[in-house]
Amino acid sequence: MSGQYRATTQGIAVSVEPFYLDDESDPEQGHYVWAYMVEIRNDTDTPVQLRSRHWTIVDALGRKEEVEGPGVVGEEPVIEPGDTYEYSSGCPLKTSSGIMSGTYRMEREDGSSFDVIIPAFSLDLPDAVHIIN
């Protein structure tokens, strides 16, 4: 996965690719759904375990939601040196666009932990007209 959005923190590279889910969305009811694919690559020389996640989700009206919890998609994967871990998840919004960002808490074999940046990525309708002021 190439990932539109990328960030690397302490040798852990995170790539994210969002996709609008037209079939699951209902714009007339103010219900918009995106999926996103995440790839986490361990470019260090020691294994790391993904212990928790923290997301900040902001919709087009500036409403902010914080989501945190253990692992991702019910897992707390150990990522060996040189390996990647991939998963997909989703996010519903009440507006036709938004932005997500966050962090993963990683733990090393020695018990030390650190936060890895999840790059901010935009949730936009595929055919939306973008206006920059």
Image (spheres, rainbow, N blue to C red):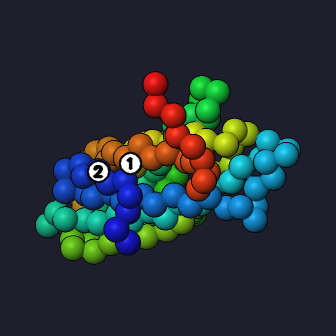
**Which residue is painted at 24% across and 49% down in the image?**
9
Q: CA distance from mark 1 to mark 2?
A: 7 Å
Please tell me whether mark 1 sits on a helix, a strand or a loop. strand
> What kind of residue is marked 2?
Ala
Q: Which residue is mark 1?
A: 118
Using the image, determine if residue 132 lies above or below residue 77. Answer: above
Whole-percent x, y for residue 91 in the image: 63, 51
- Nearer to the camera, 4 or 47: 4
**Which residue is painted at 21% across and 73% down in the image?**
82
From where the camera sits, is residue 35 visible? yes
Q: Which residue is mark 2?
A: 7
Q: Is residue 127 left or right of residue 107?
A: right
Q: Are marks 1 and 2 in contact (CB under 8 Å)?
A: yes
Q: Residues within 10 Å of mark 2 (few under 14, many from 20)?
A: some
**Which residue is painted at 38% across and 58% down in the image?**
4
Q: Is residue 32 left or right of residue 4?
A: right
- Nearer to the camera, 122 or 63: 122
- Nearer to the camera, 22 or 113: 22
